[in-house]
Amino acid sequence: MIDAEIISYIRSEIKTYVNLVLLGQTGNTTKDSEDIVNMYGGHPTMSKRPVMHPYGFVSRAMPNTLSVTCRAGDHPVSRIIIGHRDTDRPEVSNPGEVILYNAYGREIRLNALSIQIGSDGADEPLALGNKLNDFLDQLLTKLQAFTVICTAPGNASIPNPAVVADLAAFKLLNTSNPLKPLLSDTNFTEKGSLI
């Protein structure tokens, strides 16, 4: 017969191992839950286990993604998914940088000096909406004032020299690349295409 102290010790050891964080694989997912499969050899699928997400963020892992689970409560099969380890995740280049990504190649990269929206190669500067609006408003105003001078009947008209000079001054005022002030120096995207 086993004495109470040994039984208590055995129970304590079992409880310690049952409480461990375990790895499994993602099975079927919904917006609220995920099946855990292959937690260890011969273990049946644990259906519809809750998934923990950081506040303000939600995702659904692809099937067969490595799931990190832990016990929640006293029952050994009361488990929650606390994260995933995706071997196909994009690489973060530098410490402190962040990538929000999906399985379809879309990314938002918070790099040390820029933000890229689209994919790793996104290099098209985003337009600054207010500056673009002001620029186009001024340009349209100047174009509305554009008039031509008609020469003798049957001859081609010529641009009004005063308006041409005004537009040239406007271009010079906005540097050699008049659109440069309209583009972000730190936020980039790409046109992309539908899959």
Image (spheres, helix red, strand yellow):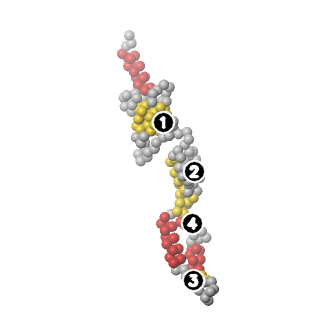
Along the polypeptide, which appears first: circle 2 or circle 4? 2
> Tag 3's secondary structure?
strand
Residue contact between numbered discs 2 and 4, judged by CB atoms under 8 Å: no
User: Is residue 73 shown to the viewer in this render?
Assistant: yes
Q: Select label 1 or label 2 by which is in front.
A: 1
Residue where numbered disc 3 is placed:
148
Residue 138 percent location from the top left of the image: 51, 74
Residue 182 percent location from the top left of the image: 53, 66
Q: Select label 4 or label 1 by which is in front.
A: 1
8 vs 137: above or below: above
Residue contact between numbered discs 1 and 3, judged by CB atoms under 8 Å: no
Report the Cα–Cα distance between label 4 and label 3.
29 Å
Amino acid carrying mark 2 in the image? Asp
Residue where numbered disc 4 is placed:
180
Say which residue appears at 55% left-offset and 39% top-offset: 87
Amino acid carrying mark 1 in the image? Thr
Report the Cα–Cα distance between label 1 and label 2.
26 Å
